[in-house]
Amino acid sequence: MTYPETNTPQIDSPRRDVTNGFGITGMVLGIIALVFSPLPVINLLALILAILGLIFGIIGLAVKGRSKGTALAGTIISTIATIVSVTLFIVYASFFNAVIHASGLIKEEAERIVARHTPVSVEYQMTGSGAADVSFSSYIDGAWEMYHEQPQLPWSTETDGRVAHFDVLKLNGTNRADSTGEINCKILIDGKVIAEETNSGSLARVTCRVTGRQIIAQVD
């Protein structure tokens, strides 16, 4: 007996996606980078991990015959981590620069305060070959203190005080009509010449002037 031939339909086994190693790696790196991206300094490392995760994620998307889900997730997460890391790095860098700048200003102001209370010696000098009219003055706390003499040159006088006491120092000298030689003025702070001027001839005039800022600069 012959039985008729029957065609039995073949049932294909369900297709399973092949694991995407690149995608998984990219997703893991992206997650780690995203977690650490908000942390100062460490977010530099997070940025590197995020870039690597992005590279692996893109490679995972390009590989054929592999699952794309993890690769897509890794690419998205790594992109977000990269943006967060870069943005916060810029924010932190700006903040630290501002703090450093502010610290410098505070230090300068502290040094200026200390300098203003530093004792200094002020010396007025007038040199020449004859007699002269000499006046010297100090602007202290909004008021001028002025002195006038008619000495035979050379002449000098000295005073002591704190930097904060002297806002402006001035020294003027004028040759007498019968003095035709040179006349020279100097203002010295702690023995160092800060201002000097020379002139010559009958009735020649010289003026030396020192400001409080110059005095502070000298004692810094």
Image (tube, helix red, strand yellow):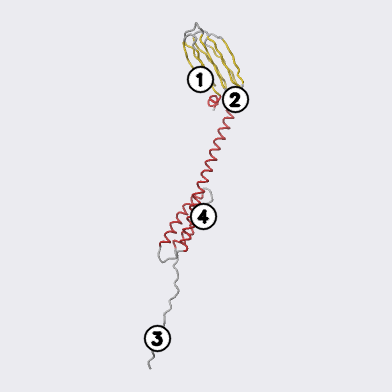
Residue designated by label 3:
6
Q: Secondary structure at mark 1?
A: strand
User: Mark 1 to mark 4: distance in Å?
Assistant: 63 Å
Type of amino acid under label 2: Ala
The amino acid type of the residue labelled 1 equals Ala
Q: Nearer the viewer, residue 122 or 97?
A: 97
Which sits earlier in the primary sequence, circle 1 or circle 4? 4
Task: Indicate whether 102 appears above or below 153.
Answer: below
Badge 2 or badge 4: first in the primary sequence: 4
- Mark 3 vs mark 4, foreground winner is 3
Residue positioned 52% across, 43% down in the render: 94
Q: CA distance from mark 1 to mark 3?
A: 121 Å
Query: Are the two marked residues, 1 and 4, in contact with CB atoms closer than 8 angstroms?
Result: no
Q: Camera-side residue: 215 or 65?
A: 65
Mark 3: few, some, or many residues within 10 Å (few <14, many ≥20)?
A: few
Q: Residue at x 45, y 56 (%)?
A: 54
The residue carrying pointer 2 sits among few (fewer than 14), some (14 to 19) or many (20 or more) residues within 10 Å by Cα, namely: many
User: Looking at the picture, how far across and down is residue 53, in whole percent?
Assistant: 46, 57
The residue that disc 2 covers is 164
Instruction: Measuring from the top left, give residue 6's x and y in whole percent.
Output: 40, 86
Residue labelled with disc 1 = 195
Q: Are marks 1 and 2 in contact (CB under 8 Å)?
A: no
Q: Secondary structure at mark 3?
A: loop
Left or right: where 65 falls relative to 150:
left
Q: Position of residue 123 (x, y in %)?
A: 55, 18
Compare residues 203 and 120 and report the one nearer the observer: 203
Q: For the N terminus, which image quadrant?
A: bottom left
